[in-house]
Image (cartoon, rainbow, N blue to C red):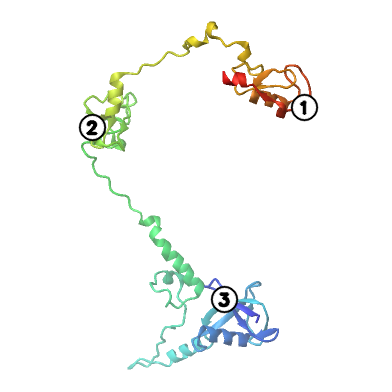
Amino acid sequence: MPGVHYKFSAKLDFDTISFHGLHISLHDLKRQIMGREQLKASNCDLQITDAQSKEEYTDDNALILKNSSVIVRRIPARGLRATSKTHAASRTEPGSGTSKAVDDSSASLPLAQLIKTANLAAANASEEDKIKAMMVQSCQEYDPINYMKRPMGPPPSSFPCRYYGKPGHYRRNCPTSGDKNFVPAPRMRRSTGIPRSFLIELKDPNTKGAMLTKTGKYAIPIINAEAYAQGKKEKPPFVPEELPSSSSSSDALPDELLCLICKDAMTDAAVTPCCGSSYCDECIRTALLASEEHTCPACHQAGVSPDDLAANKFLRQD
């Protein structure tokens, strides 16, 4: 049965209050919502707002049409704040003739104080303020104020300066940083990812392929050292290759064994029915299919079908 769809401002999904008729009064809607949500009218009241127009319903006799959507907020009950003030004013301290008002417990907390509250669920504030306070509390750990830089101590004795090449200081504290005539040391590759068993320590950092280990020593991979020791024999470019002995004129194939289309030794020789010329089976079939009138390449006769080709058994046996 259709009715009025409602949801609290802190929820995502709508619930439905079903009823007979075309509309329901604001008073009856509040009563049914409190009954379903197990709320007591003496503790709180409900503020009903139209979900589309954001217009608040204030008259208890106002009629809300069926299939409408409303937003519900819990607010302090009517008359609760005035009753607490009257009760607080009547209380007097013993031994004094003046009355002292007690703080109103129903007053909602301000947002600045709500952010410092640990238990937001039990805090006396609106749902919107609780959500804002929760968002602020969840981001406090990532505030840049909480970031602290790790203090930089002196570098280890095996750590060399990348600019000066000598240990004892970092690049920012290099004594040669202001000297324009100083030539920096060449950058060294690091041996990151290479096991120690694959490296050979070096004494001369100028050795070709030298790397810097994490201990500050110089090393080179074993396979690179062996390759540099043997040297690389490169073939001069653009050297003409020697022709094989089988390509001489004395070993050339006769013309009878060459295809008339590809000029190479015939593969799966086939004979045309018109003139008896021999071709590669693939070459002659491709030529006939490419021609619009299936013309023979030798005698130029039209209408030669690829299905009429015959195998040249003599050439295929050779």
Nearest to the observer: residue 282 or residue 77: 282
- Picture layout, residue 137 above or below residue 230: below
Q: Is residue 3 left or right of residue 137?
A: right
Percent across and percent down for residue 262 are 63, 18
Element under label 1?
loop
Comparing marks 1 and 2, which lies closer to the viewer? 1
Label 3, secondary structure: give it: strand
Instruction: Give the amino acid type for the residue marked by disc 3 in the picture.
Output: Lys
Question: Is residue 289 shown left or right of residue 237?
Answer: right
For the C terminus, give its image quadrant: top right
Relative to 56, residue 312 above or below:
above
**Which residue is at a point 46% across and 70% down the rendered structure image?**
111
Alpha carbon separation for disc pair 1 and 3: 78 Å
Q: Residue 217, which numbered label?
A: 2
Gap in angstroms between the C-alphas marked 1 and 2:
78 Å
230 versus 96 height, above or below: above
Name the foreground residue: 313 vs 279: 313
Which residue appears at 42% of the width and 65% of the height?
137
Is tag 1's residue or tag 3's residue first in the polypeptide sequence?
3
Q: Name the image quarter holding residue 215.
A: top left
Query: Pointer 1: what residue?
Result: 292
Q: Judge from the rendering whether residue 141 lies leftward or rightward of residue 225; answer left or right.
A: right
- Helix, strand or loop status at disc 2: loop
Camera-nearest label, 1 or 3: 1
x then y, percent, for residue 164: 28, 30
Residue identified by numbered label 3: 7
Kind of residue sitting beneath label 1: Glu
State the residue in front, 304 or 232. 304
**Callout 1 touching callout 3 (CB < 8 Å):** no
The quarter of the displayed image where residue 157 is located = top left
Q: How many marks?
A: 3
